Amino acid sequence: MDILRPIEDKYSIEKEHWVGTAFRVKNYFPEGKNLLDRFSPFALMDYNAPREFPPSKSARGIGPHPHRGIETVTLAFQGSVEHHDNAGHHGIIYPGDVQWMTAGKGIMHKEYHEKGFQKTGGIFHVVQLWISLPKKDKFTEPRYQDIRNENMGKIRLENGMGEITVISGEVIDTKGPALTFSPINLYVVNLQSQGKITLEEPGNYNTGILIMKGNIEVNNTSCVENDFVLFENREGKIKINNASKDTKILVLSGEPLNEPALAAGPFVMNTKEELRQAAEDYRNGVFGTDNF
Ligand code: MN
């Protein structure tokens, strides 16, 4: 008998809010549940479930705003997202791509629906994660990784049951291209009808899955679309069975930083003093220009 990794919690978020005019999100954490310590290094997950945006003549987005102490990771599944920041980075991610921005010591950026998508409209399906930087890397230089789907690790499951796309870390001997500051396995599992897969993550890693499309059984527990499943920190297999057609799952698994995490607005730091300093630095223009 395989030992299964126990499920600690399973929850879904109904409530949605706008982030600027571009993202209509369900906040799974820290607003849905405060998992800042429990789910380190992951600090935030905003989920824009598939939603139709009509064609628009005006830009849809979030204007210049700061971040410090984190990486913001944006995964586009449908629709396209454009990014500019005051460290000189510019990028557009299309369906299947990921943008991995390191805010580090401080950055200003803006995030928009890509102009072509804005004009034609369509289904928009995006996840944004915030990942805490380790204390020693909080003030690293800003960095931008534009990760194209074709450069991600791909695992084809036997019998045409589906595919795993590895963004960072390593899954079943396949690596993902994203550079991270702490060990993180981030990947997307697509399953066909009746598809199944057994996953195994280190027991000390904080591990959770978001079911973005379809229904599955996770360790003999029925899960439906929009459920988030948090696992206990114990060794054990994650057995996914009985997938419905076109099931899509996001797996987040990371080694805990074992450092205090405190969040205020766009900043995630280790102490209250560092949060106060971040707000003061922002007021004093230390984050640089908002004209880019
Ligand atoms: Mn942002």
Image (spheres, rainbow, N blue to C red):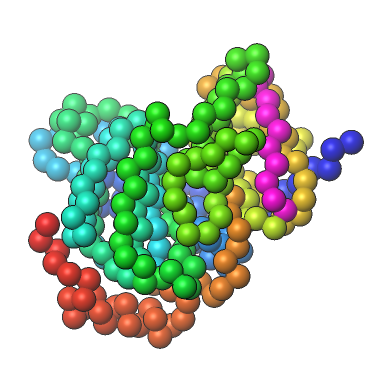
Q: Is residue 118 visible?
A: yes
Q: Is 110 a magenta residue? A: no
Residue at screen point 32% across, 65% down: 141
Question: Dividing the picture into quarters, in which one does residue 199 lie?
Answer: top right
The answer to whether residue 33 is above or below residue 154 is below
User: In screen coordinates, is 238 left or right of 185?
Assistant: right
Q: Give the range drawn in magenta.
A: 194-203
Whole-percent x, y for residue 26 in the image: 43, 48
Residue 46 makes an appearance in the image: no
Residue extending farthest right: 1
Q: In the depicted view, which residue is nearer to us: 19 or 161?
A: 161
In the rendered image, the residue lying farthest to the top is: 159
Position of 176 with respect to 283 (left or right) is: right
- Residue at x-position 79% and y-position 42%: 4
User: Which of the two residues, 247 or 99, is positioned nearer the viewer here?
Assistant: 99
The picture places residue 51, in percent across and down from the top left corner, at 35, 34
Q: Which residue is located at x 21 percent, y 76 percent?
A: 286
Quadrant (top left/top right/bottom left/bottom right) for the C terminus? bottom left
Relative height, residue 256 to residue 264 (above, below)? above
| Residue 246: image location, x then y, percent | 53, 22
Q: Is the magenta stretch mostly helix, strand or loop?
A: loop
Q: Where is residue 275 in the image (x, y as percent from the top left)?
A: 38, 78
